[in-house]
Image (cartoon, helix red, strand yellow):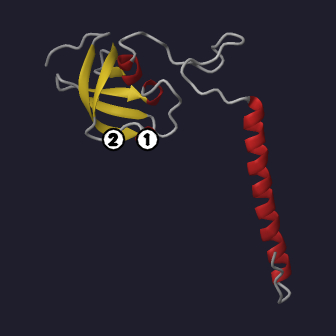
């Protein structure tokens, strides 16, 4: 097995997918992990929407630990090796926005939350009313 060089970009094959990342078989026979935060520039909710087993992917080698763990990044390999660190909660400066992400305003998020909440409340009330009236032998339909 040849040694892996931190910072180099190699092609590998996806051998396994978990909810926290993907395992990649590297050309030297070792397996590395691409954490879910290193799959794409945008937020990844479901890694299966981005990767499948047997996909060939270019990865940048981020770290090689003494215990054999290899840290990889697909998004940094796609950015031609430019180290653009993943945004972390609370680490952005005041007024800055994540690069390459669709920005949804607080008002839009709040409106969506209220709409979903109202729908759930309506369904709950409907089910509760049906159970109350259903015990007397008649049902009320809307």
Q: According to the image, label 1 marks what residue? A: 49
Q: In which quarter of the image is residue 73?
A: top left
Q: In which quarter of the image is the C terminus?
A: bottom right
In this view of the protein, which residue sits in the foreground, 76 or 22? Answer: 76
Query: Is 128 placed left or right of 14 in the picture?
Result: right
Mark 2: which secondary structure? loop
How dense is the environment of label 1, judged by Cα within 10 Å: few (below 14), some, or many (20 and up)?
A: few
Query: Is 67 placed left or right of 111 in the picture?
Result: left
Residue 130 spot, x, y in % from top left: 80, 76
Q: In which quarter of the image is the N terminus?
A: top left
Residue 100 spot, x, y in % from top left: 54, 21
Q: Distance between the residues labelled 1 and 2?
A: 8 Å
Q: Are marks 1 and 2 in contact (CB under 8 Å)?
A: no
Residue 84 spot, x, y in % from top left: 47, 12
Mark 1: which secondary structure? helix
In the displayed structure, 130 sits above or below 57; it is below
Q: Residue 52 carries which label?
A: 2
Residue visible at 36% across and 20% down? 71
In the displayed structure, 72 sits above or below 22; it is above
Residue visible at 36% across and 37% down? 51
């Amino acid at each position: 097995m040849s040694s892996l060089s931190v910072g180099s970009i190699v092609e590998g094959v996806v051998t396994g997918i978990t909810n926290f990342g993907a395992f990649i078989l590297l050309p030297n026979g070792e397996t590395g992990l691409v954490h879910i935060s290193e799959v794409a520039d945008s937020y990844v909710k479901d890694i299966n929407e981005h990767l499948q087993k047997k996909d060939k992917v270019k990865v940048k080698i981020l770290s090689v630990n003494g215990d054999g763990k290899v840290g990889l990044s697909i998004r940094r390999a796609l950015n031609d090796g430019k180290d653009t660190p993943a945004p972390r909660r609370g680490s952005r400066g005041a007024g800055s926005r994540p690069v390459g992400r669709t920005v949804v305003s607080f008002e839009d998020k709040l409106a969506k939350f209220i709409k979903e909440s109202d729908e759930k409340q309506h369904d709950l009330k409907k089910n509760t009313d049906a159970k109350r009236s259903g015990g007397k032998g008649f049902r009320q339909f809307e």
